[in-house]
Amino acid sequence: MIKQLFAFLAVSGMLASNDLHADDNPFATIADFRTLPVDVELHRAEERQQSAKIVQVDGQPQYRVEWKQSIGPFLEFCFPRNYANTHTKLPAFTTARIKLRVLLPDRHSIHHLNLRLRDSENEIFQYACDVSKLPAGWHTLEYNVNNNGEKAGVWGGGRNPNKRIDFPAYFHGLAADYILDKADGMVSWFALETVQIGDIVELNPRFAVIDTGHPIHILASGHEDDLRIVLDNDSPRVIRGTLEYTISDYKQTVISQNTLPLDVSPQTIFSAPVKAPAKYGVYTVKTIVNDNDKRIPPAQKITSFAYMKPVGATAGKAEGFLFGVCSHPQRNSTEVIKKEAIAASSVGIKILREDISWDLMQPSQDRWNFEPFDRVVNLFGEQGVEIQAIYDYCPGWATAKDWKPLDSTKRGVPRPDYDLWRKFIAEFSKRYKDKIRYGEVWNEPDLVGFANYSAEEYIQLMKIAYEEVKKHAPSTYVLIVVHTTSMRSTAMDVSPATASSSTTCSK
């Protein structure tokens, strides 16, 4: 009877019960709200008069989520991203069961308690459980989940949503909807204890990749013996089958191929040496893992590597002609920035052009956030690459009150208040005077999208920047604007008289 019940649940995708489950397979705890060391991010909590915190009831901790009955009719919260990535990671699964331990009060008004998972591509998967008819007391809500997103609401994923759970994946948070009673000012609540996962069936394929022993897939001259084909079996099962690989050059000419037998124990790494190419160049590696278990499809992967003699990193600051690139590493994680810095130095780059992004560095007039830019300066500095800073972009709070858009039909970046601009340049220059040798005044102001103000206004910004940089960081070079077009756009049309009065921006 119990097996029949769970067969039904596998179809329906959800269950509310009192500790009922079909077998004794162990369940692993992925979140214990009673000892949660961080605050959850409760969406629009102040506006909706909602809260989530640990309280003591009869000497025992409970994680209580509260809301005002007259405001709503839903709530949602998630864990801080850094905490979730470290503490709520899920084991890979094809199918699994997740249990949520929850306390419902008398006469509760909750319709659904919804479980949310987040995958490696930032897609969110929501599984709903109807609790409207459950009585007061502790309950174990059970959610049947699978990696194809079946029975789930799915959103997010940026440019690559596929409605499948791509691992690594994480327990993201919860949502609830409830009866809205605008005439009732009563505070309602529920309490949480633990979230656990078990009954895992894991039939996901595992992929093989090329490994050069280098963080950005460079096979450096003198390290030819480091080239290997690697398969990480992080699954709970033995992988038996074959691994095929083919290596091709940039002309798609096959230079080597092979088929290897696989018998890889759980939680181990298979690694096989590969002969290095005879010539420097960029090579593509296609791998196919054929599992003897026919329920698992062939796992095909294409990766690449560069066989070369890296130039860097080279110590010291370059003089004379500087080989550089433009990039935006502040947008990336520390791990990605490190790899980008290594890649830049490996090909001889000595300077990187990057926006300061005033709106990011000073989100409000009384608050500074130097960490993102510091991180870029320091990580690239470790590889001998300097940053050419672009003084640019206007936070909303710093927009000039007398600003009039050059093109009122387009949004564009507004012109900042001159006094606030002066203070920003001064503060930046004082902090980075020993680290930044080159500063560029604004980015591509001939495009209205980047600078929706006149050339005369730009010249005034340039004068102010020059004055403040030279006052606080006199050894810094102040660079004139970079244009994107060969012909002057409307934004940069300026009279000869105005142009001749502009400050010469140099050392």
Image: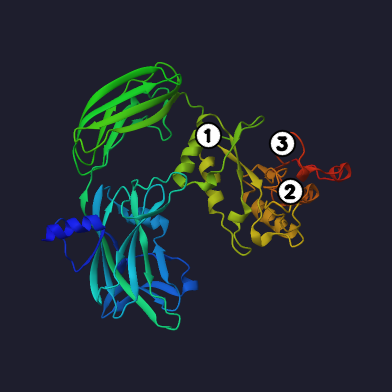
- The quarter of the rendered structure image containing the C terminus is top right
Secondary structure, mark 2, is helix
The residue where tag 2 is placed is 470
Query: Can you tell which of label 1 and label 2 is closer to the viewer?
Result: 1
Question: In the rendered image, which quarter is residue 421 located in?
Answer: bottom right
Q: Position of residue 481 (x, y in %)?
A: 72, 41
Q: Position of residue 52 (x, y in %)?
A: 39, 71
Question: In the rendered image, which quarter is residue 349 located in?
Answer: top right
Q: Position of residue 337 (x, y in %)?
A: 49, 42
Cα distance in 3D space between marks 3 and 2: 29 Å
Q: Given the image, on which type of amino acid does mark 1 rest?
A: Ala
The residue where tag 3 is placed is 485
Residue 242 in view? yes
Q: Is residue 273 above or below residue 174?
A: above
Q: Position of residue 380 (x, y in %)?
A: 53, 41
Check if mark 1's residue and mark 2's residue have beta carbons within 8 Å.
no
Picture mark count: 3
- Residue at image location 34% in from the left, 18% down from the top: 256
Earlier in the chain: of badge 3 and badge 2, it is: 2
The residue where tag 1 is placed is 344
Earlier in the chain: of badge 1 and badge 3, it is: 1
316 on left or right of 64? right
- The quarter of the rendered structure image containing the N terminus is bottom left
Q: Given the image, on which type of amino acid does mark 3 rest?
A: Thr
Q: Given the image, on which type of amino acid does mark 2 rest?
A: Lys
Secondary structure, mark 1, is helix
Farthest residue to the right: give it.
Answer: 497
Q: Dot 1 surroundings within 10 Å: few (below 14), some, or many (20 or more)?
A: many
Query: Can you tell which of label 3 and label 2 is closer to the viewer?
Result: 3
